[in-house]
C-alpha cells in the first residue's frame, strides 16, 4: 500500500479512503477523527466524531452538546477498527486531551500529529513519539530562529515584573484553551498564591480544566467593579482584549503576551506588548527536528506553518518530505474569533480557536 492510498488530501482536509473518514476536517463531513479541541482542528457539524474523551468534552463546552450527530471516545493506546484501517490515539502534549492519530493498514503506519509540543506542561499528558513509516507534522515554528526558552524562566520573568511594579496590574494575553490554563498552573508552581483573575471569555474552559483535577488555585472572573482595585494582580485574558476597551480601566496595566511569536521583537512592538513572554504550545525548530528523528519515519509530510524550511532540512537528512500546503489551519499567533469580546464569555455556539 502506498501512503497516498491510506491518506490523501481533499478540499475538506486529510481523508482516509479505506476507512472512509477525515482527520481534523475544515468543513462538516460524515466521519471525523479529531486531534484536539482548538477550533481550526475541531469544528461542529460532523455526522460522527471520534476523539479523546477530553476533546469531546471541550467541543461540547465550546459548541454545545449537539455539536455532532454522534460521538465516540477514543482511549489512548487502544486501536479502533475503522473499516480496513485501525486508528490509535497517542498523547500529543499540546493541550488537555490532545492526541496524535496513528493509522495502520496493509503493513503501513502513518501518524498524523495534529499540533504538538515537547516542553513540559502540568495540564496535559506529554508527547509520545510513535515509530511510523510516514510522519505528518505541523511546522508553526519551523524556522531556526524559533528556539523557545525554558517556560519556567518566562514565568519567573512575569513574577519579577509583578514584584517590581506592585502598583500596576499585569495583563497577560493568552489563548483561551490550553495556554491560559498552562500559564496559571506554572504561576502556581512558581509560588504565586494570590488570586489569579481572568477575563470572562476564559471562564468556561478554565472551569472545565478544574473539573478534570487540574490544580489552578484561586481563579476569579474579573467583574466591572474590580478592575480599578487590581493593582499588583495578574489578570489573564484573550489576546484581543489587550487592545479592547475592557482593558482600559485597569490601574496602569503592564501588557504581556504569552506566545511563541514573542521571540520576534517586531511582533511584540506591533502589538504594543511591554512584557513579551515566549510561552508556546507548539514544538520549536529543535523539537520539530528531534521528533522527526525519534519517530524514524522515512517520509515526512508537513501540514501548515513554515513548511519549506522543514522540508529542506529533511532533505539534508536523506528523508523524503513534502509540504501539504493545507488551508484552514491557523497558528499560535492568530487571535480567536471568540476573543473579540468585552468582558463576557462567547456563546456556546461560537467557535474560538487556539
Image (tube, grey):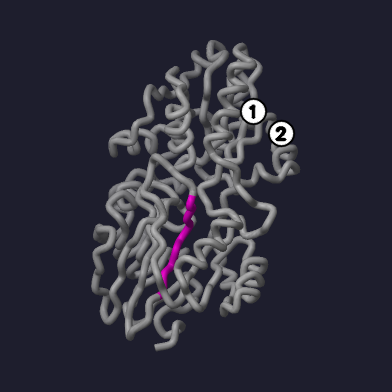
The reply to whether the C-beta atoms of the residues labelled 2 and 1 are less than 8 Å apart is: yes
- Distance (Cα) linking label 2 and label 1: 8 Å
Question: Crowdedness of circle 1 by 10 Å Cα count: few (<14), some, many (20+)?
Answer: many
Residue 23 against residue 195 in the figure, above or below: below
Which residue occupies the extreme bottom position in the image?
A: 1
Q: Which residues are magenta?
A: 110-118
Question: Crowdedness of circle 2 by 10 Å Cα count: few (<14), some, many (20+)?
Answer: some
* Residue 84: percent from left, percent from top: 27, 82
* Residue 224: percent from left, percent from top: 50, 18
Q: In this view of the protein, which residue sits in the foreground, 240 or 2?
A: 2
Q: The residue tagged with tag 2: helix, strand or loop?
A: loop
Can residue 71 be seen in the rendering of this structure?
A: no
Residue under the image location 68 percent in, 33 percent down: 273
Q: Which residue is mark 1?
A: 255
Q: Quadrant of residue 329?
A: bottom right
Residue under the image location 37 percent in, 81 percent down: 108
Residue 291 against residue 149 in the figure, above or below: below
- In the rendered structure, the answer to whether residue 86 lies left or right of residue 98 reads left
Q: In this view of the protein, which residue sits in the foreground, 42 or 97?
A: 97
Q: In this view of the protein, which residue sits in the foreground, 44 or 148?
A: 148
Counting residues from the start of the chain, the first of labels 2 and 1 encountered is 1
Q: Main secondary structure of the magenta part?
A: loop
Q: The residue tagged with tag 1: helix, strand or loop?
A: strand
Can residue 181 be seen in the rendering of this structure?
A: yes
Q: Quadrant of residue 269?
A: top right
Q: Which residue is mark 2?
A: 272
Residue 80 against residue 256 in the figure, above or below: below
Query: Magenta span has 88?
Result: no
Residue under the image location 58 percent in, 34 percent down: 154
Residue under the image location 64 percent in, 69 percent down: 313
* Residue 124: percent from left, percent from top: 38, 45
Amino acid at each position: 500500500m502506498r501512503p497516498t492510498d491510506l491518506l490523501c488530501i481533499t478540499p475538506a482536509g486529510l481523508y482516509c479512503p479505506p476507512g472512509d473518514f477525515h482527520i481534523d476536517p475544515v468543513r462538516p463531513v460524515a466521519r471525523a477523527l479529531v486531534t484536539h479541541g482548538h477550533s481550526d482542528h475541531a469544528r461542529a457539524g460532523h455526522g460522527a466524531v471520534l476523539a479523546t474523551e477530553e476533546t469531546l468534552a471541550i467541543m461540547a463546552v465550546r459548541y454545545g452538546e449537539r455539536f455532532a450527530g454522534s460521538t465516540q471516545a477514543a482511549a489512548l493506546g487502544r486501536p479502533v477498527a475503522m473499516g480496513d484501517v485501525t486508528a490509535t490515539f497517542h498523547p500529543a502534549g499540546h493541550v488537555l486531551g490532545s492526541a496524535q492519530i496513528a493509522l495502520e493498514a496493509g503493513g503501513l503506519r502513518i501518524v498524523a500529529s495534529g499540533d504538538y509540543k515537547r516542553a513540559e506542561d502540568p495540564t496535559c499528558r506529554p508527547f509520545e513519539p510513535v515509530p511510523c513509516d510516514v510522519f505528518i507534522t505541523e511546522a508553526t515554528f519551523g524556522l531556526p530562529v524559533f528556539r523557545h526558552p525554558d517556560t519556567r524562566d518566562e514565568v519567573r520573568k512575569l513574577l519579577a515584573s509583578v514584584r517590581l511594579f506592585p502598583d500596576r496590574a499585569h495583563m497577560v494575553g493568552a489563548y483561551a484553551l490550553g495556554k491560559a490554563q498552562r500559564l496559571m498552573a506554572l504561576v502556581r508552581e512558581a509560588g504565586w498564591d494570590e488570586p489569579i483573575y481572568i477575563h470572562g471569555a476564559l471562564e468556561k474552559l478554565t472551569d472545565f480544566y478544574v473539573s478534570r483535577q487540574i490544580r489552578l488555585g484561586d481563579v476569579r472572573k474579573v467583574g466591572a467593579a474590580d478592575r480599578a482595585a487590581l493593582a499588583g494582580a495578574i489578570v489573564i485574558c484573550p489576546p484581543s482584549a489587550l487592545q479592547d476597551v475592557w482593558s482600559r480601566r485597569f490601574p496602569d496595566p503592564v501588557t504581556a503576551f504569552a506566545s511563541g511569536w514573542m521571540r520576534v521583537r517586531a511582533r511584540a512592538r506591533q502589538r504594543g506588548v511591554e512584557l513579551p513572554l515566549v510561552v508556546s504550545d507548539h514544538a520549536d525548530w529543535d523539537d520539530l527536528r528531534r521528533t522527526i528523528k525519534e519517530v524514524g519515519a522515512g517520509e515526512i509530510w508537513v501540514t501548515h506553518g513554515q513548511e519549506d524550511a522543514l522540508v529542506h532540512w529533511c532533505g539534508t537528512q536523506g528523508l523524503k518530505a513534502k509540504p501539504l500546503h493545507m488551508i484552514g489551519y491557523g497558528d499560535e499567533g492568530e487571535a480567536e474569533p471568540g476573543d473579540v469580546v468585552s468582558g463576557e464569555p462567547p456563546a456556546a455556539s461560537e467557535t474560538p480557536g487556539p
